[in-house]
Image: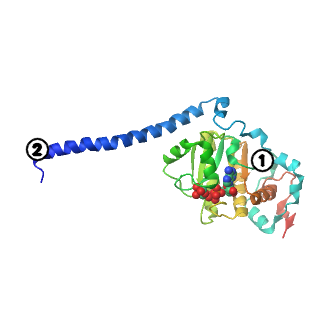
């Protein structure tokens, strides 16, 4: 048993000891937090030429070098050989398009074959996990190129639900922002559509005029590639019809299977020659 006088001494020693133990941890936490915030502000205010020194020299692609879809179609006439299927037609007919916008919108979308981390645009989207801890696939590539402060900022966001999206700085990436979204692991169409909707919804607050999407959920999470492309394309089409400020949505295709799917389906959702797919023209069984 501790006597009253000894008890006071015991507790004051205990408090001093506890403060010594806890303080370095708190300080450490504050220093780390403020480091990413300082870095984020610093990068946001760097002139472009200075910012470019952060990424590998010459290792970036500016928006002007990514052909808009209307130009891509003219340069790659062979894509007309890629025919959509009856299932594609059924999916496609789930939305009603405004054909008067076809020409304008075919200048606002692109397909880009390659590494999303190279794009010097306003925002790239990351196919993340719900803990926002760097994983494999495109997530790993983005974290490696952005540097460690990206993980530090992610740690402050308290995770991200399936179908939700959160935004961070791009740090050492050529892209200004990374939008982290978590695709479904159970094949949910609603959740995947929500990934695209919620990512695009950041455009207003952050003045995002150019954005690139990887094929969310089609890698490690196993969502069927073709259905995922329909969801991406119809969500983008509806968004662009309603939001004139967005200048470019880029679909980043990394796997050969997605390259072919997007080349086929873009011709339906962003027709350049005014083909009428609702008539069932150019269908392969
Ligand atoms: N640039 C563009 N696309 C890429 C790149 C790249 N550098 N690397 C891969 N892809 P995935 P998910 C493509 O697996 O299915 C992570 O561990 C890839 O070929 O990256 O949503 C997260 O932490 C595929 O077409 O994302 C989660 O745990 C697409 O990106 C989980 O994976 C998406 O594949 C998320 O799985």
The reply, left or right, for residue 183 in relation to residue 210 is left
Q: Quadrant of residue 104?
A: top right
- Mark 1 lies on a secondary structure that is helix
Q: Which residue is mark 1?
A: 105
Residue 276 visible here: yes
The reply, left or right, for residue 5 in relation to residue 186 is left
Quadrant in the picture for the N terminus: bottom left
Which residue occupies the foreground of this view, 91 or 16? 16
* Image point (87%, 63%), residue name: 282
Residue 201 visible here: no
* Image point (65%, 43%), residue name: 123
Which residue occupies the foreground of this view, 34 or 237? 34
Rendered location of residue 164, percent (x, y)? 57, 54
- Judged by depth in the image, the label closer to the viewer, 1 or 2, is 2
* Image point (74%, 49%), residue name: 114
Q: Is mark 1 within 8 Å of ligand 1?
A: no
Q: Which mark is residue 271?
A: none
Q: Is residue 190 above or below residue 117?
A: below
Rendered location of residue 265, percent (x, y)? 78, 58
Q: Residue furthest bottom?
A: 285
Residue density around tag 2, few if under 14, some if 14–19, many if 20 or more, within 10 Å: few
Q: Which residue is mark 2?
A: 5
Quadrant in the picture for the C terminus: bottom right
């Amino acid at each position: 048993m501790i006597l009253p006088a000894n008890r006071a001494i015991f507790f004051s020693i205990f408090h001093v000891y506890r403060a010594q133990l806890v303080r370095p941890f708190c300080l450490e936490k504050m220093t780390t937090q403020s480091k990413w915030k300082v870095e984020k502000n610093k990068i946001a205010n760097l002139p472009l030429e200075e910012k470019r020194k952060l990424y590998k020299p010459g290792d970036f692609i500016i928006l002007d070098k990514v052909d808009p879809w209307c130009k891509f179609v003219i340069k790659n006439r062979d894509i007309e050989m890629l025919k959509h299927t009856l299932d594609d037609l059924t999916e496609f007919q789930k939305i009603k398009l405004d054909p008067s916008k076809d020409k304008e919108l075919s200048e606002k979308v692109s397909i880009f074959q390659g590494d999303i981390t190279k794009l010097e645009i306003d925002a790239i989207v990351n196919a993340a996990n719900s803990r926002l801890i760097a994983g494999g696939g495109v997530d790993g590539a983005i974290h490696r190129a952005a540097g460690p402060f990206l993980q530090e900022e992610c740690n402050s966001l308290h995770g991200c639900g399936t179908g939700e999206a959160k935004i961070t700085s791009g740090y050492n990436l050529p892209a200004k922002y990374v939008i982290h979204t978590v695709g479904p692991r159970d094949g949910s169409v609603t959740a995947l559509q929500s990934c695209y909707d919620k990512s695009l919804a950041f455009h207003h607050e952050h003045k995002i005029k150019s954005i690139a999407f990887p094929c969310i959920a089609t890698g490690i999470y196993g969502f069927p590639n073709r259905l995922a492309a329909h969801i991406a394309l119809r969500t983008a089409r509806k968004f662009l019809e309603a939001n004139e400020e967005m200048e470019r949505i880029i679909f980043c295709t990394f796997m050969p299977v997605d390259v072919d799917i997007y080349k086929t389906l873009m011709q339906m959702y962003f027709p350049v020659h005014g083909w009428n797919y609702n008539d069932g023209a150019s269908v392969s069984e």
